[in-house]
Amino acid sequence: MSTYQSVFKRYEKKYMLNEEQYRHLLKRAAGKVKEDKFKQSRINTIYFDTPDYHLISASLEKPLYKEKLRLRSYGTPHGHDQVFVELKKKFQGVVYKRRTVMSLEEAVEYLYHRKPARNASQITQEIDWFLKFYGEIGPAMYISYERLALSGIEDPGLRITFDQDILWRQDELDLSMAPWGRSLLVPGQRLMEIKIAGAMPLWLAHILDELAIYPSSFSKYGKAYLTSSAGQILNKGGKIIA
């Protein structure tokens, strides 16, 4: 993880696939995509929120602008292993992501105990502002999943990911703990994300149409929140939201 991309601006589209759609899509996309540098990996993420889950409840209302803060690792990290601190924003369908790399130990001091980042940057300044703006914010949800990541051969800006075995929990909000939790998907389901800087390649659009694969507004954190006891509450309008 010596080199990494720290700033992203792209469109992200999500699709829910069954096993048959997944197998046929991979077969038809052969020669157009290849495994990226992360290939298959276990991704573990801690989402941060206010005690009343303001960030995720606001996000579920589908506003023009929304943002989230998360701590992410590839595999289970310990001590000096590197992790990503990510600030992700979405405005009018465009995703903007800023991330910085730290050791797990430093990230815990920074996000959990609010100690200054050891290597300040424009990105940590944005994160500092976020933390100050939302005040009492802390770890709220752990989500872990197996991911297969592909990138375009002719279009290196294209990235396609497939997530399965998505687990969530609200206990042991610590990336150094082993992945465990409640399942978010039924067996055989995969969440596909297509990440592109501009228009979708025609060959990919044709495959999606042929296999009857349609966009979904699925959110891992959102779904876990609605499934949790925290999500079983009355919204401002007095309606049950889960």
Image: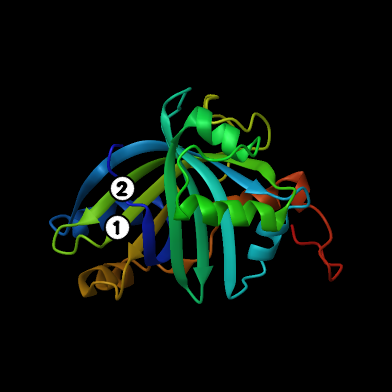
**Residue 8 vs residue 239, the one in the foreground:** 8
What secondary structure is marked by label 2? strand
Q: Residue at x 62, y 71 (%)?
A: 62
Q: Are the residues at dot 2 and dot 1 in contact (C-beta closer than 8 Å)?
A: yes
Q: Residues within 10 Å of mark 1 (few under 14, many from 20)?
A: many
Q: Amino acid at mark 1?
A: Arg
Tell me: 131 left or right of 87. right
Q: Amino acid at mark 2?
A: Ala
Tell me: 27 left or right of 240. left
Task: Say which quarter of the image contains residue 14.
Answer: bottom left
Residue that numbered label 2 is attached to: 149
Residue that numbered label 1 is attached to: 159
Q: Residue at x 32, y 51 (%)?
A: 5
Q: Is residue 35 something one can see in this rendering? A: yes
Q: Is residue 190 something one can see in this rendering? A: no
Q: Position of residue 160 (x, y in %)?
A: 31, 56
What secondary structure is marked by label 1? strand
